[in-house]
Image: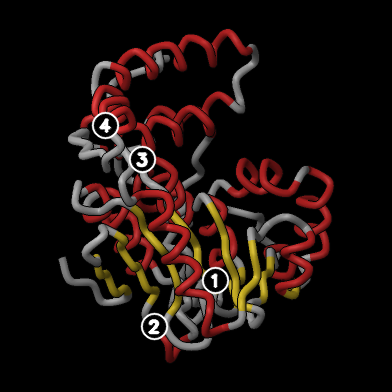
């Protein structure tokens, strides 16, 4: 598909580059960008030719946050409604709740999180508001020394969105998450790195090459099924109440990979050759119980 706010390219190794592309507006987030990002991660990125996704920004910014110049409710919400928690849960994907009550940033991060492939943020400049919180659903965050990160919602009288109340404390810890949200300060790249939000810092010209090198190290000569299941296991089982729950899903994942790509992996190891894995991320075995 073609997009109006994004650029999408896939190289020969299956590494996709997703570029937020509103450079004249510092890649500010709009409702159109929200819909397009959700579409990319629910559709384009799920094609089996795509092995990993790198997300970056066009020009000197990653994403300057929500574009506040739009008329009406800038978040696209229907102010005539008075939704309750139960109503929203029971009608999450139905109108009017789907499009005019649900947080658009959360729809994007849920789509990112559900992708069974590595997603790497290459934060090339300012990442503020949704520009910061959308990266939390990505598996790793690399940043330029020019980057700035801000969870500035308190300055606008609103709350952190995009499921960041789930992601941020898991990444940096509850104390740091609360401090950053309470203060609503703009953090330097160094402060974000010291706070464990960022994996690594890079000179501006070195950022994307480092992200590509990392992505290739994850996916070249690797099983897409093993990668996809590993991502699901680590995210889900880190939040379960008892290690037995992890054992149940681990057991099924080991069972199905051992009779699938695992056979090829073992044969390639014994024969001292490069494996040719046939598994597809679009056909992962079910290893978690429903409900």
Quadrant position of residue 98: top left
Report the front residue among 2 and 209: 209
The image quarter in which residue 258 lies: top left
Please, is residue 235 above or below residue 49 in the view?
above
Considering every residue shown, the one lying at the far front of the view is 271
Task: Report the residue marked by disc 4.
Answer: 271
- Residue where numbered disc 2 is placed: 22
Query: How far, Cα to Cα, is label 2 from label 3?
Result: 27 Å
Q: Which residue is mark 1?
A: 123
Is residue 102 in sight in this rendering? no
Looking at the image, is mark 4 or mark 3 earlier in the sequence?
3
Q: The N terminus appears in which quarter of the rendering?
A: bottom left
- Of marks 4 and 1, which one's residue comes earlier in the chain? 1
> Is residue 189 placed above or below 83 in the rendered structure?
below
In the visual, does 71 lie left or right of 174? left
Q: Which residue is disc 3 drawn over? A: 116
Estimate how packed mark 2 is, as few (under 14), some (14 to 19) or many (20 or more) residues with alpha carbons within 10 Å. many
Of mark 4 and mark 2, the one earlier in the sequence is 2
Measured from the top left, where is residue 63 in percent x and y? 51, 74
Which of the numbered marks, if any, corresponds to residue 226? none
**Image position, residue 31 (x, y; %):** 38, 66
Q: CA distance from mark 4 to mark 3?
A: 29 Å
């Amino acid at each position: 598909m073609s997009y109006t706010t994004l650029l999408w390219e896939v190289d020969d190794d299956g590494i996709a580059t997703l570029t937020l592309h509103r450079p004249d507006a510092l890649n500010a987030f709009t409702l159109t960008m929200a819909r397009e990002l959700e579409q990319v991660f629910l559709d384009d990125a799920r094609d089996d030719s795509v092995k990993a996704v790198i997300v970056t920004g066009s020009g000197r910014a990653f994403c300057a946050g929500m574009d506040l110049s739009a008329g009406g409710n800038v978040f696209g919400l229907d102010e005539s409604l008075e939704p309750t928690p139960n109503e929203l849960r029971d009608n999450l994907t139905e109108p009017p709740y789907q499009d005019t009550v649900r947080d658009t940033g959360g729809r994007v991060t849920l789509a990112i999180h559900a992708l069974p492939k590595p997603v790497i943020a290459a934060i090339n400049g300012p990442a503020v508001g949704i520009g910061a919180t959308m990266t939390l659903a990505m598996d790793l965050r690399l940043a330029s020394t020019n980057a700035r990160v801000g969870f500035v919602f308190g300055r606008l009288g609103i709350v952190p969105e995009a499921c960041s109340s789930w992601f941020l404390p898991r990444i940096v810890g509850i104390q740091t998450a609360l401090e950053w949200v309470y203060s609503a300060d703009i953090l330097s790249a160094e402060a974000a790195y010291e706070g464990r939000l960022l994996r690594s810092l890079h000179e501006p010209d070195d950022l994307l090459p480092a992200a590509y090198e990392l992505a290739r190290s994850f996916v070249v000569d690797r099983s897409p099924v093993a990668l996809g299941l590993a991502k699901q296991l680590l995210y889900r089982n880190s939040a379960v109440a008892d290690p037995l729950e992890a054992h149940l899903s681990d057991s099924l994942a080991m069972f199905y990979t051992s009779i699938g790509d695992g056979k090829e992996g073992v044969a390639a190891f014994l024969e001292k050759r490069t494996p040719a894995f046939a598994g597809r991320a679009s056909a992962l075995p079910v290893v978690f119980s429903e409900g």
